[in-house]
Structures are given as C-alpha cells and as structure tokens.
Image: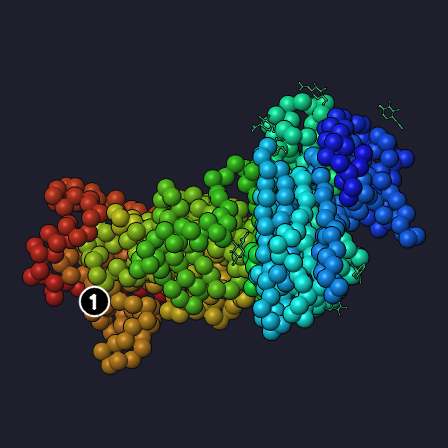
Amino acid sequence: MLSAAASSTPMSLLLLQMLLLLAVASAEPDGRCLTKCGDVEIPYPFGIGHNCSLAEGFSLICNTVGGLKKPFYGNVEVLNISLTMGQVRMLNHISSACYYPNHSFVSPSEWTLNMAPPYRFSDRLNKFTVIGCHTLAYIVSRHDNSSYQSGCVSMCQNKKSLTDGSCSGVGCCQTSIPKNLTYYSVTFDNAFRNQGNWGFGNCSYAVLLEAESFQFHTSYITTNQFMQINSDGWAPVVMDWTIGHETCEVASHNLSSYACISNNSTCIDSSNGPGYLCNCSTGYQGNPYVSNGCRDIDECNQQSNSCSDGANCQNLPGNYSCHCPEGTHGDAYNGTCIPNQKLSLAVKAVIGTSISLTFLLVFGMCICMIYQRRKLIQSRKRYFSEHGGMELREEMRKLGLAFRIFSNKELERAINRVDKISRILGEGGYGIVYKGDIGDRFVAIKKPKVISERKKKEFGKEMLILSQVNHKNIVKLLGCCLDVEVPMLVYEFVPNGNLFDQIHRRIDTLAVRLNIACDSADALAYLHSSASPPIIHGDVKSANILLDENFTAKISDFGFSRLNPKDKEQFATFVQGTHGYLDPEFVRTGKFTEKSDVYSFGVVLLELLTRKKAIYFDENGEETYLASSFILPKKEDRLEEHLDNQGASEEDEQLIERIGELAVQCLSARGEERPTMKDVADQLNNMRKFKQHSWTSSNAEDNQSFHPVTSDAQTSTSNTSCISEVSLRIECAR
Ligand SMILES: *[C@@H]1O[C@H](CO)[C@@H](O)[C@H](O)[C@H]1NC(C)=O
Ligand SMILES: *[C@@H]1O[C@H](CO)[C@@H](O)[C@H](O)[C@H]1NC(C)=O
Ligand SMILES: *[C@@H]1O[C@H](CO)[C@@H](O)[C@H](O)[C@H]1NC(C)=O
Ligand SMILES: *[C@@H]1O[C@H](CO)[C@@H](O)[C@H](O)[C@H]1NC(C)=O
Ligand SMILES: *[C@@H]1O[C@H](CO)[C@@H](O)[C@H](O)[C@H]1NC(C)=O
Ligand SMILES: *[C@@H]1O[C@H](CO)[C@@H](O)[C@H](O)[C@H]1NC(C)=O
Ligand SMILES: *[C@@H]1O[C@H](CO)[C@@H](O)[C@H](O)[C@H]1NC(C)=O
Ligand SMILES: *[C@@H]1O[C@H](CO)[C@@H](O)[C@H](O)[C@H]1NC(C)=O
Ligand SMILES: *[C@@H]1O[C@H](CO)[C@@H](O)[C@H](O)[C@H]1NC(C)=O
Ligand SMILES: *[C@@H]1O[C@H](CO)[C@@H](O)[C@H](O)[C@H]1NC(C)=O
Ligand SMILES: *[C@@H]1O[C@H](CO)[C@@H](O)[C@H](O)[C@H]1NC(C)=O
Ligand SMILES: *[C@@H]1O[C@H](CO)[C@@H](O)[C@H](O)[C@H]1NC(C)=O
C-alpha cells in the first residue's frame, strides 16, 4: 500500500504502483465512514478504511502521532484536501548534506517519493528548492517514459551577499518542475561540498515544496533552523489528483464509472496529466462526487452579496436576482438604488388638501344645483297648481279644447327663436308683449309684471272661459303658461300693429275706418251678449284694437279677468281703464258695466273720425279730452273742425255725420242712455252695407277693398280740392 519509503527498493515500488492502478471505483461511502481525521476533513472520493473511498488511491489511514490523529497516505502525512482545486497538501521529507570539522562528510539523507496516480506533483505550486553554500542538488524523475533530471546550484560569496526573501542562487536556489511528475528523488553532487570553511553553515538542504509556504532566511544557511520550522524535517508539497485517466468526454459516456454524479456538477479535464475532475456548477457548492452534493449557494445570505446597497436580494436555483425596493430605482446589481422623486410632506399635504377641497367644492356645487333644480321644479309645480292648472287641464280634457298649456321653457325657446330686434311687440306698465315662434306659427306672448291674489286663484277658470271665446274679430287666446309666478298668455300674432299707432299714419279712407269700427263693435257685442258668462272688456281703446294684414280689426287684451264681477268692491280693484277712455259714470259711482265699454268705444269712434288722440294738446297747448272737446264745441257749431272728413263726398259726409251722432250717443253721461253694444254694431253694419252699396253702384274701381294704401291713394288724389270745404254738423242727442 505504501508507495513511498526511504529505504524501499525500485522493485517494491513498482509492485505497489501496480496495486494502485488496479484499484476499482467503489460505491459511495456509507455512514460508517469517517469524514474527519483529527482536524482534517476527508471528503469523498477520499476515505478512511475499506470501501470508503472512490478508489484505492484515495484511501487514507488515520494514525495517532504524538497523541494527535493525523491522516496518512502510506507514510506521507496529508495536511488537507481540496475538492474544488483537485489538490492534496502533503508533507515531503527535506533531504540534507552536512560537512563536519573533523573533515568527515556525512552521507546525505537522500529521499525518494513515488506517487502513483491519481497523484501528480503540482507543477504550478511546487518548486524544487536548494538551500546551502557551494551546493548542487538534483531532482530526478521519470517524465514521458524518459528520465528527467534537473539541478539547482546555490553559491555563497560572503555573508553580506545573502538576502532574506531572495531565493535566486545566492544561498538559495529554486527551480520549476514539469507537468505529469509522479516520481521524485533528490541527490547531492559530491563535487560541491559545503565544507563550512567560510563560516557558513555546515549543512545543505534540498526539497520539492509548496513555493508559497516558503520564504528564505539567511539564518537557514548558518543554522539548522530550516529543518526545525518545517515540522522537524518535513515541508508541504501540493499534489494534483484526478479521477481515472480518461478525459471528461470519454468518462461521461460510462455512467457506471463516471464520478461527477451530483446534480448541477460539471466535469473538468485535468491540466496536469490524464484524468478529470468534478466541480459544482456556478451558483452551487458542495461535493460533486456524491449525489445531490452540489447545493445551491444562497448568495443572498453571503456577507457580501452581489446586490447593491439597499437592494432586495432573491435567491434562485444556481443564481440570484436583485431588485430595487418599492419607491426606488436604479441598478440593483452594480449601482445603487436611488429613491424615486419624492414629494415633500408639505407639497403632498397641499396637493391632498387642494384635491379634497376641489372635490368638496364640486360636490357642494352639485348638491346646490340639484337642490336649486328641485326647488325650481317644485315652485313650478306650486305655481301651476296655484294658478288652477290642474282644474284647467281636467276641463280641457273634458271639453276637448284646442287650448294649450305651455311650459315656461317652451315659451322661452319660442321667444329666443325670434331675432332680438323684432322680439318685443309692446311694453308698458302692465308688462311686456313678446313675439314668439312656436314652430308652426308666430304668437304674441304677454308677460304681465304682477298679478293680484284674486286673479291668481281664478286664473285657470278664466282661461277656460276665455279660451272658448271664438270670434273672427277677437284675438284668439291660444294658450297660457302657468308654471311661473305671473302666468303668461299666448295669443295669435296679429301682424299690423294696433289702431292707435296706425290711425294717424296709413288709415285714411272712410271705408277702412268704418270697417274697423264695425268689426270692433261686432267683437264687443259678441263679448257682451254671446259669450257665457258675459265678458266686459274693461279697457276698450284704440291701442287694444289690432290690425291684421288686411286691416281687419281684432280686439285684444279683453277681459284679462274682466268677467262680470259679483260685487263692486272686488271690481274696483281690477278695473284699470285708460285715462281718456274711462266712463265718467264709473268714476262717479264706481259701477262698471257693459255700458262702460260702450262709452270707451264712443271715444274710439271719435278717434276714427277725427284721427286725434283720446287726450290731445289743443292749439293753446292745453291737455284736452277728445270726448269732452267733441261734445262742447257742438254748442258753438265748431264741430266740423274736429272731424277728419278730408276728401269726403257728400254721401260720406252724411255717413260721417251719422257715425258722429252714434259716437255722441255712446258718450252719454248716463249709462242707460247709451245704446247697447249690439245696437252700435247693428247701426255700424247698416252704414257699412249702405256704403258698400253706394260704392258698388257709383265707384266700381274703388270697390270694397280693405287695402287702404292703394285704394286710399286713389281716393285722396281725386278729391284733394274739396278737403277744406267739407264739414260735418253733428246733432248730439242729449
Ligand atoms: C467492500 O466492498 C466489496 C464489494 O462491494 C465487498 O465485497 C466487501 O465486503 C466490502 N468490504 C467491507 C470491509 O465492507
Ligand atoms: C491546509 O493546511 C495548511 C497547513 O496546515 C493550512 O495552512 C491551510 O489553511 C489548509 N487549507 C485548507 C483549505 O484547509
Ligand atoms: C471549481 O469551481 C470553483 C468555484 O466555481 C472554482 O473556484 C474552481 O477553480 C473550480 N475548479 C476547477 C478545477 O476548475
Ligand atoms: C560546523 O563546523 C564548525 C567548524 O568548522 C563547528 O564549529 C560547528 O559546530 C559545526 N556545526 C555543526 C552543526 O556541526
Ligand atoms: C566527526 O564528527 C562527527 C560529529 O561530530 C562524528 O559523528 C564523526 O564520527 C567524526 N568522524 C570521525 C572520522 O572522527
Ligand atoms: C518506455 O520505456 C520502455 C522501457 O524503458 C520502452 O520499452 C518503451 O518503448 C518506452 N515507450 C516510449 C513511448 O518511449
Ligand atoms: C465502465 O466502467 C466499468 C468500471 O470501471 C467497467 O467495468 C466497464 O467496462 C466500463 N464500460 C465501458 C463501456 O467502458
Ligand atoms: C437531481 O435533482 C432532482 C430534483 O432536484 C432529483 O429529482 C434528481 O433525482 C436529482 N438527480 C440526481 C442524479 O441526483
Ligand atoms: C441543476 O439541476 C437541476 C436538476 O437536474 C436542473 O433542473 C437545473 O437546471 C440545474 N441548474 C443549473 C444551474 O444547471
Ligand atoms: C504522463 O505520464 C505517464 C506515465 O507516468 C504517461 O503514460 C502519460 O502519457 C503522460 N501524459 C502526459 C500528458 O504527459
Ligand atoms: C444569473 O443571473 C444573471 C443576471 O440575471 C445572468 O446574467 C446570469 O447568466 C445567470 N447565471 C446563471 C448560471 O443562470
Ligand atoms: C458593474 O460596474 C462595473 C464598473 O462600473 C462594470 O465594469 C461592470 O460591467 C458592471 N457590471 C454589471 C453587471 O453591470
């Protein structure tokens, strides 16, 4: 078993070598195998005892030397074993040669070490080292089937030439060895004898040792210190070992003998001769020669893991990964993890506060809007029912009326469809009249400013009555709007303005004026007698007589609650007759009747005849009532001054006179003396019939045209000469 012995013969060495080569791979060591001898770990494929090692060459002995347990390979002590490097550190004997003063030369202690495979002397780590003066020593070996011999000479000139740490031929000499050396022996050349003559030491030394473990000291020349520091004549030498003598490629094909059995292990060809080694794959560590011997390295638990400072490390099988923690970024492997741009607490607070404030604001506004809207809807509903909308709707449904209840929105839209300039038709103390477009036609929308409490309550009822008023000379009430505080009324649109505005401008033929008077009288008569209940207009005046495109009169603004009142007190509150038209009897007695309308109509008749306003300024600049001024001049026979009978024929003069008489009747101070509206209408109609008859018989081209502009122009031009001569005498029935 022993492969080396100081006194062994070449024959026995060969025999031992043969035995070693025959060593076969054995099974893995079981639990009985020692894994440690003294302080030295014995990892598989090495083993102590039978069947504990991979091959005979890895089988060690554990001996007790001086009370300490030490592993031996043969008689060579093993210091430690490295699996990863495939190396074993052993102790090599230091050979020496001494010369003594009595001139006797002690035969040098020469040494032979025959390491059979799997061991080879490491050519990288070992140096053949010779110490002494005047010394030549040889390392002798076999190399590639041939003999190898390499000498090293060390000379000393004087003590001063020796230097600590320097081993370059002065007192110390080192030489490398080739690869693949398994056999080693030392011989001293007798020709170079260290005779001690020069006061140097008497002994020379030669050994193959681990270069790193050696450092030359000058004392090694003069004393035997070198022998003593290295465990009494032994020096460490590094052996490379391999598995078998095949390459990885070959060996890996024979799985029954392949030594790299662990998961995640790799095979490496030896750099120092035949055979291979096993190693754990990168990221693994342990013993590649036993199954599952290679264990994952927990890189994250290593003191200096490869992640950057502050980075999070995650261990993976055979690897690891690094991540910068939440809120940071950067190179987690190499650089540093830099915190993300962080907003300062103050900025955060400001942002947070403003966001929540904005939210609150928006939320509040929404609530407010919803509340407002609801309030609006509620108030609309309230107004609607206050104004009797429910009852009105119910009645309408029953009667099937063509009356319509508009919503405020609809009317606003209708008004907005008309351009701004022509939007307002009239404006006054009562409110505003707008023009509106409800899609299929234009309408007039009357928007009063105020409404009295009483009217409010009866509004719906009144609407019901007024909506049934249907006469061609009465402006048709199309609908109303109840869901506002002051209800609005929607009338048919009459395009040509009112009589008050037009009377001075365009209407000057008698025929047209008679027509207007007739139509208005018809309408009022209808209101007084045919409507049920009777309706008193209450505000008859030229401004309330509208004219359509054919100058047909249409009474408007009747009875916005001038239904026949039940008691006088109530009545007084709502009569709002216009100054100049107001019945003096009503002023005196406070009694308002149909005859009050008759009085007012008398004033309108006068307006038509005179083309003066109900209250006008006379030549002296005094405010004068048309009614009184008309009646007073009668006595002085100056009535004709007031009458506008320009260009009138003799027939017309009579007609004008008759109309004047009628007007004076209407203006009677006492109501019962005035004719009824029906009477007035009948008389006017008779006059019209008579006039038409005379027209058709005498003046064909003048016809009965209601187009005042054209017909008027003809008439007036033909009669300009007579204007001043025409006069009318009116007998007032009084
Ligand atoms: C060693 O192994 C061989 C074969 O596996 C077996 O025959 C022998 O008994 C074992 N020796 C010991 C001491 O266990
Ligand atoms: C091997 O042994 C030497 C000498 O005893 C010691 O200095 C070295 O640290 C050891 N190496 C290992 C890897 O155990
Ligand atoms: C085995 O692996 C280790 C770690 O990966 C490495 O240091 C060593 O050099 C490798 N051994 C050989 C013989 O390549
Ligand atoms: C070496 O020789 C000198 C005389 O030459 C002698 O004094 C000395 O003791 C010797 N040293 C040893 C170790 O024998
Ligand atoms: C010379 O001296 C050494 C030790 O001092 C001794 O061992 C040796 O026998 C001596 N030789 C002779 C020939 O006296
Ligand atoms: C090796 O040496 C032996 C005997 O010394 C000889 O027979 C053999 O041919 C040599 N082989 C080589 C490859 O030189
Ligand atoms: C594989 O190795 C075993 C043991 O070393 C040996 O007996 C066998 O012949 C080898 N097989 C091949 C194919 O090399
Ligand atoms: C390799 O590892 C897997 C699971 O990690 C295991 O199942 C398998 O047996 C292992 N193979 C060897 C040869 O150890
Ligand atoms: C380690 O071995 C296992 C099982 O054989 C395999 O799945 C894994 O990929 C190996 N890891 C490496 C880094 O080769
Ligand atoms: C190493 O030496 C052995 C004999 O000791 C020889 O058979 C082998 O071919 C040599 N290999 C190399 C690579 O020198
Ligand atoms: C380990 O991870 C790094 C980075 O993710 C990668 O570059 C490397 O190739 C990995 N190594 C192995 C053996 O998976
Ligand atoms: C780490 O940084 C060094 C020096 O900056 C660079 O050479 C190296 O390639 C970097 N490694 C990785 C994995 O980024």
Location of residue 42 with respect to 359 vertically, above or below:
above
**Secondary structure beneath label 1:** helix
Q: Which one is nearer the viewer's eye here, 503 or 198?
A: 198
**Quadrant where the image shows the C terminus:** bottom left
Q: Is residue 230 visible?
A: yes
Query: Mark 1, residues whose alpha carbon is within 10 Å: few (<14), some, or many (≥20)?
Result: some
Residue for point 90% across, 35% down? 32
Residue for point 77% across, 44% down? 6
In the image, what residue type sits under mark 1?
A: Glu
Q: Which one is nearer the viewer's eye here, 348 or 234?
A: 234
Which quarter of the picture shows residue 277?
top right
Which percent across, then down, holds residue 707? 20, 48
Which percent across, then down, holds residue 58? 77, 36
Which quarter of the picture shows residue 434?
bottom left
Location of residue 168 with respect to 467 vertically, above or below:
below
Q: Is mark 1 within 8 Å of ligand 12?
A: no
Q: Which one is nearer the viewer's eye here, 317 or 63?
A: 63
Residue for point 78% across, 41% down? 7
Which percent across, then down, holds residue 696? 16, 41
Q: How many marks?
A: 1
Left or right side of 595 for 723: left
Q: Residue at label 1?
A: 640
Check the image and name the residue furthest to the right: 67
Left or right side of 187 for 562: left
Colour mapping used in the image: rainbow
Location of residue 425 with respect to 19 vertically, above or below:
below
Q: Which one is nearer the viewer's eye here, 298 or 672?
A: 298
**Quadrant where the image shows the N terminus:** top right
Q: Is residue 594 visible?
A: no
Which percent across, then down, holds residue 314? 68, 48
Location of residue 19 with respect to 85 vertically, above or below:
above
Residue for point 84% across, 30% down? 51
